[in-house]
């Protein structure tokens, strides 16, 4: 009988109920961070979120020799990879679940920048009805080029952006050089930026991004808003992967993790 430990930072009960009917597994929810760390050595598998993964979890994973599969409720896993995932452990992600939602958020942020909404919001707060600044800043997407950048060699070259460009980041905060971004905005090299992710998170109250001109910040919420259909797809994937794990079959969306 395989033991599956679940800790997602809240809402574990419903997920455990959905998974506990699967033959060949016993699913248990951790009551919190300390309980999750304490119970990892007894588990064969762990379902969690990379949001909570830190050096303590990485060290406990190294020590938990029985634990051979980690399912994360995220598409990205770079922080786990950076801290080290043992060779015995299979790490699986949620694949493309939620990708369309994040893409929608990115487009929303881009359109908000193009239509000069930061300028309009500033005027709204000042209770000023002045069309000039918004009209002069507003642009259309028609005829523009949109670049989608990952974290390869090109993704690490943000200096390649042409003057007057807009930067939208819904990936990881660390892929943007924030001081360089602020300098580019201040000098007018960039027309604006919209960031769902920053480094560090949460952003300190004294950080210059809060007051930078033509910057939109959302608190790492590009994934939100999928509702019941998103939750249903997620539970179906988790159920299928737990079944596969119990039968000794390969799980879906196993990640190509670089090992220490």
Image (cartoon, rainbow, N blue to C red):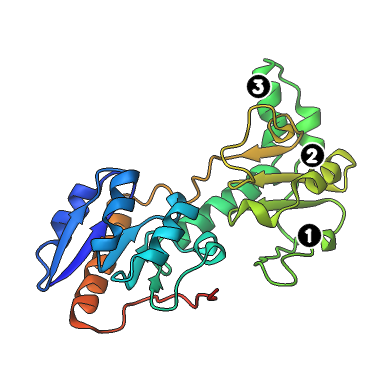
Q: Is residue 31 above or below residue 127?
A: below
Image coords of residue 32 (percent x, y): 30, 43
Image coords of residue 83 (percent x, y): 53, 62
Judge from the rendering whether residue 108 lies leftward or rightward of residue 8; answer left or right: right
Residue drawn where x is 34% and y is 77% of the image: 252
Q: Earlier in the sequence, mark 3 or mark 2?
A: 3
Q: Do labels 3 and 1 touch, CB within 8 Å?
A: no
Choose top left, top right, bottom left or bottom right for residue 48. Answer: bottom left
- Front-lying residue, 40 or 215: 40
| Residue that badge 1 annotates | 158
Judge from the rendering whether residue 16 lies leftward or rightward of residue 221; answer left or right: left
Choose top left, top right, bottom left or bottom right for residue 73. Answer: bottom left
Residue drawn where x is 61% and y is 36% of the image: 203
Residue 54 visible: no
Image coords of residue 37 (percent x, y): 33, 52
The residue positioned farthest toward the bottom in the image shown: 249
Distance from Cα at disc 1 to Cα at disc 2: 23 Å
Distance from Cα at disc 3 to Cα at disc 2: 16 Å
| Residue that badge 3 annotates | 124
Image coords of residue 74 (percent x, y): 43, 60
The residue positioned farthest toward the right in the image shown: 187
Which is closer to the viewer, label 1 or label 2? 1
Quadrant for the N terminus, please: bottom left
Residue drawn where x is 46% and y is 56% of the image: 101
Disc number placed over residue 137 in the picture, else none? 2
- Secondary element at image label 2: helix
Disc number placed over residue 147 in the picture, else none? none
Residue 107 visible: yes
């Amino acid at each position: 009988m395989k033991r599956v430990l679940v800790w997602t930072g809240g809402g574990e009960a419903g997920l455990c109920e959905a998974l506990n009917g699967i033959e060949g597994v016993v699913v248990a929810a951790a009551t919190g961070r300390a309980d999750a760390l304490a119970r990892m050595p007894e588990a064969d598998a762990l379902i969690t979120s990379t949001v909570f993964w830190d050096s303590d979890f990485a060290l406990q994973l190294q020590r938990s020799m029985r634990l051979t599969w980690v399912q994360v409720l995220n598409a990205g896993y770079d922080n786990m990879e950076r801290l080290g995932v043992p060779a015995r452990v299979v790490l699986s992600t949620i694949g493309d679940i939620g990708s369309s939602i994040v893409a929608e958020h990115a487009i929303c942020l881009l359109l908000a920048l193009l239509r000069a909404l930061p300028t309009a919001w500033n005027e709204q707060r000042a209770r000023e009805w002045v069309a000039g600044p918004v009209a002069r800043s507003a642009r259309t997407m028609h005829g523009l080029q949109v670049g989608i950048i990952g974290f390869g060699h090109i993704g690490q070259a943000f200096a390649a952006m042409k003057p007057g460009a807009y930067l939208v980041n819904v990936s990881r905060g660390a892929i943007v050089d924030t001081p360089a971004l602020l300098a580019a905005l201040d000098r007018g090299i960039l027309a604006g930026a919209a960031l769902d992710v920053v480094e560090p998170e949460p952003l300190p109250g004294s950080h210059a991004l809060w007051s930078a001109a033509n910057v939109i910040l959302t608190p790492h919420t590009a994934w939100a808003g999928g509702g019941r259909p998103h939750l249903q797809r997620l539970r179906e994937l988790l159920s299928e992967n737990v079944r596969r794990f119990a039968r000794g079959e390969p799980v879906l969306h196993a990640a190509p993790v670089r090992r220490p």
